[in-house]
Image: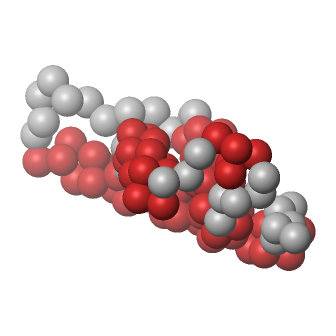
Amino acid sequence: MNNNFFYIFFIYFIIKKKMTTKQLTQCKLPIWLAYSMLVYVSACVYYIIMTRNIGTPLYDTLTDDQKIEKNKSADKRRKIFYTGIIVSALIFWIWKPFKPCQ
């Protein structure tokens, strides 16, 4: 997923709720948003670590065999990324690094 989506969502959320900098520094940011950002960043780090030695498919001459290999590679990378999301979510659900606002 594109990183710009989360920036746009965050800006939209602030505009829709008319949140000011003062409100953000006074613990008015929803805890679910903090967790979702942390899970996404953790999944990205996990993805980078796990896929650094996989290699990339060839795009110059895509024969049928190469298309099959490309699809296998995409499936492997997708599974690694989703595993990162699930593992991160479980870790942060147990660890609970963010506390609700008082």
Instruction: Answer left or right for 1 relative to 70.
Output: right
| Snapshot quadrant of residue 88 | bottom right
Name the foreground residue: 21 vs 59.
21
User: Measuring 70% from the left and 60% from the top, which residue is drawn there?
Assistant: 28
Task: Give the left or right position of residue 56, taking residue 28 as reference.
Answer: left
Residue name at image x 31 percent, y 35 percent = 57
Nearest the viewer among 48 and 18 is 18
70 or 10: nearer the eye? 10
- Image quadrant in which you'd find residue 96: bottom right
The reply, left or right, for residue 83 in relation to residue 90 is left
Quadrant for the C terminus in the image: bottom right
* Percent x, y of residue 10: 48, 50
- Image: 52 above or below 71: above
**Colour theme:** secondary structure
Is residue 55 placed above or below 1 in the rendered structure?
A: above
Above or below, comparing residue 25 to residue 92 in the picture: above
Q: Position of residue 24 (x, y in %)?
A: 68, 49
Task: Name the residue rendered at 12%, 36% in the picture.
Answer: 62
Figure disc tally: 0
Residue, x 78% and y 52% (percent of image)? 26
Residue 27 in sight from this viewpoint = yes
Residue lying farthest to the top in this orientation: 60
Residue 5 drawn at (x, y percent): 38, 47
In percent of width and height, residue 98 lies at 83, 62
Q: Quadrant of residue 48?
A: top right
Whether residue 43 is visible: no
